[in-house]
């Protein structure tokens, strides 16, 4: 899957998890950029991404994610 397609699908997941249809993410988006992105929502986000992309992250991969771009890269590697 191409990066643009992954980011588009990720944006849909973010809108759903954070209940904000106007939310727009970029590769540089971090938890600091989204007000409701706390540790609980991070878990919900990871689970939603795993469902959406039919894959699983391991703990070390989750720990390496510093921004949405890192998440998209890991998803592309697992596809």
Image (cartoon, rainbow, N blue to C red):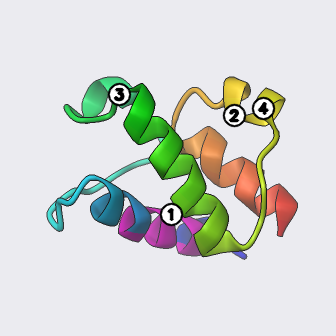
Foreground tag (2 vs 1):
2
Q: Measure the alpha-carbon separation of dots 1 and 4.
A: 22 Å
Q: Earlier in the sequence, mark 2 or mark 1?
A: 1
Q: Are marks 2 and 4 in contact (CB under 8 Å)?
A: yes
Q: Measure the alpha-carbon separation of dots 2 and 3.
A: 14 Å
At x 35% / y 51%, what residue is drawn?
Answer: 25
Q: Which residue is mark 3?
A: 38
Q: Earlier in the sequence, mark 3 or mark 4?
A: 3
At x 52% / y 40%, what residue is drawn?
Answer: 43
The outermost residue toward the front is 40
Q: Residues within 10 Å of mark 4 (few under 14, many from 20)?
A: few
Quarter of image, res 21: bottom left
Foreground tag (1 vs 3):
3
Return the mark for residue 33.
none
35, above or below 69, in the image: above
Instruction: Please state, as top left, top right, bottom left or bottom right, where the N terminus lies in the image.
Output: bottom right
Horizontal and vertical percent position of residue 30: 41, 31
Q: Earlier in the sequence, mark 1 or mark 4?
A: 1
Q: Is residue 33 left or right of residue 7?
A: left
Horizontal and vertical percent position of residue 61: 78, 35
Q: Measure the alpha-carbon separation of dots 1 and 3.
A: 21 Å
Instruction: Please state, as top left, top right, bottom left or bottom right, where the C terminus lies in the image.
Output: bottom right
Visible residue check, residue 3: yes
Q: Which residues are magenta?
A: 5-12
61, above or below 11, in the image: above
Q: Is residue 4 left or right of residue 53?
A: left
Q: Is residue 43 left or right of residue 59?
A: left
Q: Which residue is mark 4?
A: 59
Return the mark for residue 7.
1
């Amino acid at each position: 899957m191409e990066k643009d397609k992954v980011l588009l699908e990720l944006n849909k997941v973010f809108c759903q998890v954070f209940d904000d249809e106007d939310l727009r993410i970029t590769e540089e988006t971090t938890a600091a950029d989204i007000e409701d992105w706390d540790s609980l929502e991070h878990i919900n986000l990871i689970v939603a991404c795993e469902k959406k992309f039919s894959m699983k992250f391991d703990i070390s991969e989750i720990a390496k994610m510093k921004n949405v771009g890192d998440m998209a890269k890991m998803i592309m590697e697992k596809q």
